[in-house]
Image (cartoon, rainbow, N blue to C red):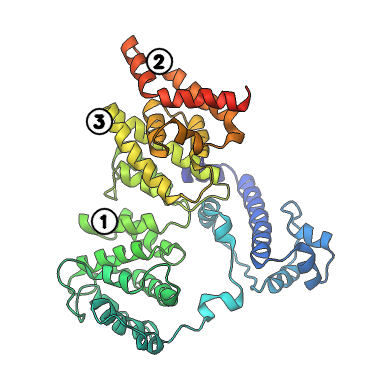
Amino acid sequence: MSVSREQLIDELRSSREYREAYAESFLNQVLTAQIRVIREQRGFKQKELAAKVGKHQPGWSRIEDSGYGKWNVSTLREVAAALDTWLRVSLEPYGKLVDEALSLSPDALKQPSFDEDPAFLRPPRAVDLLREEQDSGPVGELRRQLLPWLEESKWRPEPLIDWLQGRNLISFGHEDEPYRWFLRALPAGDAKWSWHRLELARRLAKILEDQPDVQKPGRRPSELLSSLFLLAAGLDCPDLLADPLYAVYGRLRRGTAELDDVVRDCLLAALTRNQKDLRLYEVWLRMMETGKHDVLPGNEYAGFEGVTWLPPRPDFRDTLEEVAYAIKLLEQLWWKTEGYDEAVERLRRTLLDFRQRYSKQQDLAGMLLDAASRTGWTQAALYAWHVAFSSGTDDLLAVLDFSEFRFRATNLTGMLECDLRAAPDAQESERIERQHAGILTAGQICVVQAGV
């Protein structure tokens, strides 16, 4: 399990010596990790970059060693230049150390080269894109209004504020809110619109930084805020949107902003889909443990979705550990409040959604089972796992890695045997054996395959 924000804060409060030692160690680890990550991102070997800064390969190897710690600013400038980046040195409060320690991941350490930096890319001209536009309906009409505005150098937030309230736009009918048309006009995954989609996220972030939750711009501020947050959720751009959205949540928590329940629902969606660190992890756990939250209108489903949208950890097993613990909390809550059968069905749907999101991850079923054994799943979650990842014993075997059969056979049979021993009567034991026969059979086959 991850160290929580509260645990890290308590540790840093313990003494000044510990605080300073932790900060130094963290700096060394982040600096060396980022140099290595960007070098690999550029496709360079250590020897190639060493030559660029006039060093031998062993010298560069020390630069990427977190235990070295004897860099000077001049050397770091050379390293930054060799990696086509610039060096920034600043003094920071310890509160920022907490945020960064909880958000460290390889993706967060990557940086584009100058030629790949979106700030310097020349966008495709709206006039050229619109000349090719074949859509004469609402999507095409919106593009003819939206693209020129996104290319304006002078900042004018008023058009977007009006559009998101349905003003000065072609009539789309009443079946869809305006934010949905923006997402259709700039679809994700289509390179043709990628620059304009990213620019829309930048401009949306600027509007959020102007605190619309406090200033209440527009004629219908609640409608505007709902559209802003849902558009942010649909854009799914945490690098640009996570911080301004978290600032809205912070103002809501402190009572300096007032939002109605509908707008809070929309804010929850935006926060969930735009996470770049673990700042909201405790929020999601609270939702799963209690089915509610003091500020956000979430329930246990919302809490689990929040956990699954956390940024992937450097080691994917840590991500699965968090998900497995979340499943355990849901199992306990739903079994207690809804009964066993309903708990299994809810867990099955939850795990299917999780499986779909990480469908490209190899050995997902087996790795999740490993995490389940460490976090203490019982029979409802195990059976839901079984039916979510397979339709029968053969399919279950197909999704498990044979190289791990011996260990996973122990997990499969051991966890269920614990449930059998804890059964209050013979009838309950029979039900467990009958419902989980497929898992037990798979476990026995695992033993045979592993040659135990």
Residue 21 drawn above or below residue 157: above
Indicate the position of residue 21 as horizontal and vertical percent values.
66, 48
What residue type is disc 2 on?
Ala
Which residue ends up furthest to the top in the rendered image?
Answer: 426
Whether residue 234 is visible to the viewer of this picture, yes or no, is yes
Circle 1 residues within 10 Å: few <14, some 14–19, many ≥20: many
Asked where in the image residue 258 lies, by quadrant, the reply is bottom left
- How far apart are the two marked residues, 3 and 2, measured between alpha carbons? 21 Å
* Vertical placement of residue 145 versus 326, above or below: below
Up-down: is 348 above or below 59? above
Instruction: Say which quarter of the image contains residue 210.
Output: bottom left
Residue with the mark numbered 3: 338
- Mark 2, secondary structure of its residue: helix
Question: Badge 3: few (under 14), some or many (20 or more) residues near its Cα, within 10 Å?
Answer: few
285 sits left or right of 138 in the view: right
- Say whether marks 2 and 1 touch (CB < 8 Å): no
Which residue is located at x 74 percent, y 51 percent? 67
Q: Judge from the rendering whether residue 84 lies leftward or rightward of residue 138; answer left or right.
A: right
